[in-house]
Image: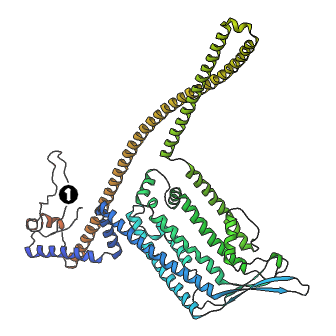
Amino acid sequence: MNIPAQVPEEIKEEEETEYIDKIRYLGIDMTKNLENKQKLLWIKTINWYLLADNIKDKIRDYIEKKMKLLDIVIILLAGLGLLTNGLQMNFYLSFDKRKNVDENGNITYSIIIRGESSNLIEILRCITSFSSLIVIILIMIHYNIKKNYLIFKHEIPFNSSYCSTNLVIPMIIEIILILIHTPPFFNDIQINLSTTGSNKEIVPIYLDLFISVFILGRVYLIFKFYANYSKWGGVFASRVCNECNAKGGFIFTYKAGIKEHPFFSVILLMALTVFIFGYGLRNSEISFITNIPERYFQDWTQITNGFWFMTTNILLIGYGDFYPTTQLGRIIAFISCLWGILLESLLVTAIVNSMKLNQKEELVYNEVEKYLEESIYKKKALNLIYQFYNSHMICDDISKTQNNSYMKNNLLDNELQVHKKRIFNKRILKTKEALIEFSKMRKNKEKKEREISVQNLMTKINIEINDNMNYLLRNIQTQINTLLENINQAQENQNKILLFSGILDVLHKTLYDKVKERTKSNGQVLDIKEIQNNKKFKDKFSNKDINENEYDKKSGVKSSKKNVYFK
């Protein structure tokens, strides 16, 4: 940068020292006048690019452990609030079954719901509210830590905000779910709703019944914990998913977990479905039981009846002893029925997979089958030999009787000879049958051996082809990954160069403006070029010679390097 200025011909040593002091002071003063946000952004950017990859991995692991511990505390506190809210609801609400008989002798039933508050109930509600408040604060801290974790996981840029990472919406949803509970002094708050059917009546509904259902949504914290910290949702799994162009995240984690533990996963999901949906169905039905005829009355005061109905519903049995009558109950039953179909399909798939033989069992099965086939083949061969031997012996016996002249004149011996011929014919038929069976079995055996040989040959060829293809794909993938890493490294180096060049330009420009303003205010004009060329400045404040208009000896090109070195 050429700075036009007018400099006196002679500069005294005191003035030169004064100028240099001004330059030092203005450099410090410039850093003080920079905006704090811009300074912090520059510092973070420089620290991020100068940080080694292994240090980033260690910081990421530390943040993950910290976040995992925080989530465990959140789950425990949310479970405490869920337990205390359920206890206070059971103590607060009581259900009475009332039998009514009208003038015509018709019997109807109604369930009366009463709410009675006490000091124990208020204490339990205070515990629920206090634990919910702490959980909300911890959730906000969790998302702040998660943003840093995603940065060190290289999933988002280091200067990302909540809005750019889409962390605000899930945080707000979680806070709303945690806020659903029964606060202290929340007594006798009811909503009047009308019943469906011919006899429409106004029924008061306690909100505590529905709040106790929606608070069960805190169970999502367990599934969230599994999705974040299982081996299928870790850093290595995410990296492999990115390399294979597969969509990771929650869906892949749950698919892999169900495949690894199918029976446990299906049974756990069924148990949670029966508990949550059965509890919600019972609370929605019990509020509308007023003046129900005896033949249509269902005793929903027992919560086990809700669990029983939900069990038969998700298994698609439907005995009909309990069924929903309200619109909300029917919606819950319909959703649980669809969910039950999915769970049953998962259960059938798990059973089919469990019935498949593993590699060792398949080897044992093939060996036993081969041994049984060999034993049957040997038995058929021995039977054929035995039939040939018997036929040969009878044929010899008949030939001996024919050569005996005495037996030819005896009628009894002739009849005996005819009988032996009949036996010989039967033996021949049995021998023929044995020969046919043996020949068929031998052909089948040879056919299987040929098929097995061809199959083994095809298997070997497929294995070799797959190995070669996998080797080529691995090499190609390795080269692509290396190329992408080089491109990313080059991009990072370019960003570093642009960052530092921008910072130096800003510093140089700001410093020059400050020096120019200070010198003008003193009635003098400062030329940095003259100070750089000053011999005393070089000896005192520079480690290298500053030469302008330096010529390259090899190319003969004139260079215009202007570097200012400050001590």
Q: Residue 205 in the image: x percent, y percent?
A: 71, 84
Look at the image and tell me whether residue 150 can be seen: yes
The quadrant of the image that shows the N terminus is: bottom left
Residue toward you, 293 or 53: 293
Q: In this view, does 186 lie above or below 49?
A: below
Q: Is residue 44 above or below residue 495?
A: below
Quarter-wise, where is residue 29 in the image? bottom left
Residue 310 in the figure: left or right of residue 265: right
The quadrant of the image that shows the C terminus is: bottom left
Residue 173 in the figure: left or right of residue 61: right
Residue toward you, 131 or 120: 120
At horizontal 54% and vertical 78% (from top left) the residue drawn is: 178
Quarter-wise, where is residue 539 in the image? bottom left
Q: Is residue 386 above or below residue 64?
A: above
Quarter-wise, where is residue 396 in the image? top right
Farthest right residue in view:
104
Q: Residue 391 in the image: x percent, y percent?
A: 63, 18
